[in-house]
Amino acid sequence: MKIIAITGSYRKGGVTDRAVDEILAAAEACGAQVSRVRLMEAQIGFCTNCRNCTQHQGVNRGACSIADDMDRILDEIEEADGLVLASPVNFGSVTAVMKRFLERLVCYAFWPWGRRIPKVRNRQRDKHALLVVTSAAPAFLVRMQAGSTGMLKQAANLLGAKTASILAIGCSATREKPVLSARTSAKARALGAKLATSAPAGPA
Ligand SMILES: Cc1cc2nc3c(=O)[nH]c(=O)nc-3n(C[C@H](O)[C@H](O)[C@H](O)COP(=O)(O)O)c2cc1C
């Protein structure tokens, strides 16, 4: 069982990072092989809307014209059995680095010139996703607004993952050096263990 986490926080050791630490530690304790990609440390360019990657038919992702870390990251995600997508809420949305990553997932759509809207290439959802959002606002507000969770869900969907759980950590912006409460840590660990022990997702 392989679990990969993609994180869109701008800082190491922040709330998002700490939550992902707990999730991955719990998954590892259940026997999973875990890895993490901090998008801030990866070289990822902006989608240029050349749409070369969307032209050919088929279930596999289209080839992107940009030579950067994206291919390697997407290969790793495709090999994984479980996915964690994590981002702080910034101005009501995911962070810009997470959004940049999300836009590059257009390679999972078939959208030739002449066609009005894109079509997801592969409707198979063979892995589970755990979404993590952290915010200054209380967690229930973030869940109600659904901007950030909606975007992460969309990313999970394109990456062939069914959203199994959402961990929303609110009221997280009061301390310069954040600490997770015992309750939040326990929740994160429980969800990490659940992700590592759940059966592969079925068809969409
Ligand atoms: C530029 C900026 C914009 C933010 N916008 C929001 C927001 O719209 N809503 C919210 O609840 N929190 C907002 N926050 C707070 C962050 O979501 C919160 O501090 C988060 O836990 C940071 O994650 P990190 O510890 O991984 O850096 C914002 C923080 C920054 C720096």
Image (tube, rainbow, N blue to C red):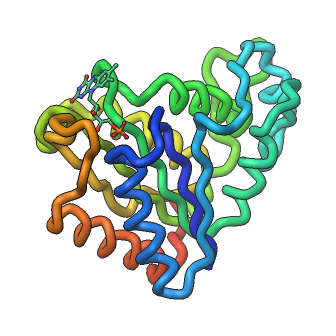
Q: Is residue 128 above or below residue 177?
A: below
Q: Could you say which is closer to the camera, residue 109 or residue 192?
A: 192
| Quarter-of-image position of residue 61 | top right
Q: Could you say which is closer to the camera, residue 173 or residue 68?
A: 173
Q: Is residue 19 left or right of residue 185?
A: right
Q: Can you give x and y, in whole percent of width and height, for residue 78 in the image? A: 71, 58
Q: Is residue 117 above or below residue 57?
A: above
Q: Quadrant of ligand 1?
A: top left
Q: Residue at the location (38% across, 63% down)?
A: 164
Q: Is residue 58 above or below residue 164?
A: above
Q: Could you say which is closer to the camera, residue 177 or residue 146?
A: 177
Q: Could you say which is closer to the camera, residue 154 or residue 137?
A: 137
Q: Is residue 167 left or right of residue 123?
A: left
Q: Can you give x and y, in whole percent of width and height, for residue 135 in the image? A: 24, 36
Which image quadrant: the N terminus? bottom right
Q: Can you give x and y, in whole percent of width and height, for residue 111 in the image? A: 72, 25
Q: Is residue 198 above or below residue 117?
A: below
Q: Residue at the location (64% across, 15% down)?
A: 116
Q: Can you give x and y, in whole percent of width and height, for residue 154 in the image? A: 48, 39
| Quarter-of-image position of residue 136 | top left
Q: Residue at the location (60% across, 38% down)?
A: 39
Q: Residue at the location (32% across, 31% down)?
A: 89
